[in-house]
Image: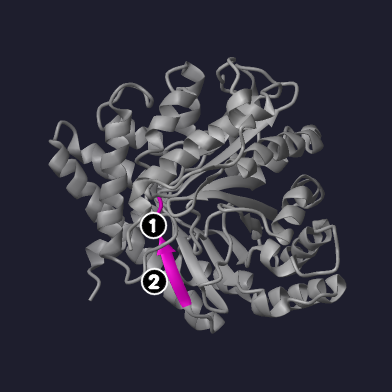
Amino acid sequence: MVSTKRIFQTIEMIDKQHLDIRTITMGISLLDCVSEDANRCRARIYDKICRRAEHLVQVGEDIESEFGIPIVNKRISVTPVALVAGGCDTEDLAPFARTLDEAAKNCGVNFIGGFSALVQKGFARGDELLLRAIPQALAETEFVCSSVNVGSTRAGINMDAVARMGRIIKETAHRTADRDGLGCAKLVVFCNAVEDNPFMAGAFHGVGEADSVINVGVSGPGVVYHALQKCKGAPFDEVAETIKKTAFQITRMGQMVAGEASRRLGTPFGIVDLSLAPTPARGDSVARILEEMGLEVCGTHGTTAALALLNDAVKKGGVMASGHVGGLSGAFIPVSEDEGMIAAAQSGVLELSKLEAMTCVCSVGLDMIAVPGDTPAETISAIIADEAAIGMVNSKTTAVRVIPVEGKTVGDVVEMGGLLGSAPVMPVHGTSSAAFVARGGRIPAPLQSLKN
C-alpha cells in the first residue's frame, strides 16, 4: 500500500524538483526486413516501424495525462542499419536514413536511433557503406541519430575506425555548419556500447533483444540535489544513503511507467535505465549535486570522487526498485545539457582533461562538448581513442559526442536549443596526435578480457 506521504513526496518531486520520465523508447528489430533489393528493404523497414510504433506517442501522452508524470520524449531505436542493409544491392545507405526519418515523422517521435555500425574488430561491407553515409545522412535528416562502436573490452580498439570517425565528425560538422555543427550532436562514438540503451544519440536495438521492447529512461538530478540539501555537513555515508533512497523512488516511478506502457502497447518490457540525465533548466543539474557535496565549482579537485559516490549510490538504490535495470544507468555529464556544467566550463574550472578523468567513474563519457572549428580530425580521433581506452580497460561503456563548430573559437557559446542546451567552446591541446592516429591497426584487448 502506497502511503499518502509518499504520494505527496512524488507530487513535490514532479512539481518543484524537475522529476520526469526522460524517455519511453521502443526498440524494434529490423532483421526480418532484410532483402537484396534496397527499395524492398526500405519499404519493409518503414512499414514495420510505423506498424509497431503507431500508438507509442499516444500511449505516452495518455500515461502522462492520467498519472500526472511528465514524459519528455518518445523515441524509437532499431537494429543497427549496417547489419540490415549490408546485403542490399546498393552502394549508398543515405536513403535508409531518410526512410528512418520519414518513419519517425509518421509516428510523431522525437528521435530515432540505429543508423549505427559495430566495428570494434573490423569492417564488414555494411559497416563501410554506413560510415561513408553518416555525414550526408545526418545533414539531410531531422530525427535520425547515429552511433559507431569502435572498441570493447573483448576486442580492443579498432584504431582504423577511430581515425575514420575523426574525419567523419569533421565532415558532419562541415555539412551542418549553417546549424553550428548540429549533425554532430546526433552522432556518438562508443566503446562497449550496450544493446538496450534508451537514450539518444546512442540508442540502437541489439541483436540479442526481442523483436520489440519498451525501454524507459528516468531522470531526476533536481530531486537528488534537493534531498542532499538536508544533509549539509553530514558524513559521506549519510550522503550515499540519501542518494540511494532517492534513486529508489525515482526508479520506482520509471518501473511503473514502463510496465504500464508495455501493457498498453502489447510490447514486452525491456529495462529501466536509471541514469540521472540533466537538462539546461536551473535546478536540474548533476554538477550542482556535486557542488552540494562541498565543491565550490564542479571540476575542482575532489570532483571525480564526488561523482564516483553519486554514480555508485544511484545504481545501488535504483537496482532495488526494478527487476530489470539496464542501459547505461548512473549519472550523465553532458556539458551543453547541464546548467551547472555550462557555468563551470565558462568559469574555466571545468576543462576537457578533468572531464576525461570524471568519465572513469560516470555512465558514459565526453558528451555534448563543443570544440573550436579548426580542431584537426586527428585530435578528435585521439580524444576518441583516450575515451575508448578508459572504457576498454575498465570494462564500462564510454563514448564521445564532440562538436567542432566552424567559425567558433574558445570562449564562444553555441546555442543548440531545447534539451541540447548551449555549449561553451572548450579548448583542446594544440600539440599534434597525428602520427599516433596514423599508425592504424588495433590496440589489443586488455588481460581482463580473458575471462573464459
The residue labelled by disc 1 is 274
Quadrant housing residue 327? bottom left
Predominant secondary structure, magenta span: strand
- Front position in the image: 216 or 33: 33
Residue nearest the viewer, comparing 219 with 98: 98
Residue identifier under label 2:
256
The percent position of residue 385, horizontal first and vertical second, equals 53, 36
Q: Is residue 446 left or right of residue 24?
A: left
The picture quadrant where one finds residue 404 is: top right
Q: Residue at 76% of width from left, 36% of height from top? A: 171
Q: Give the alpha-carbon distance from disc 1 to disc 2, as whole Å.
A: 13 Å
Over which residues does the magenta segment extend? 269-275
Tell which tag, 1 or 2, sits nearer the viewer.
Answer: 1
Indicate whether residue 129 is drawn in magenta: no
Mark 2 secondary-structure assignment: helix
**x and y percentages locating residue 401 in the rendered image:** 58, 40
Amino acid under disc 2: Met
Q: Amino acid at mark 1?
A: Leu
Pick the residue in front: 178 or 415.
178
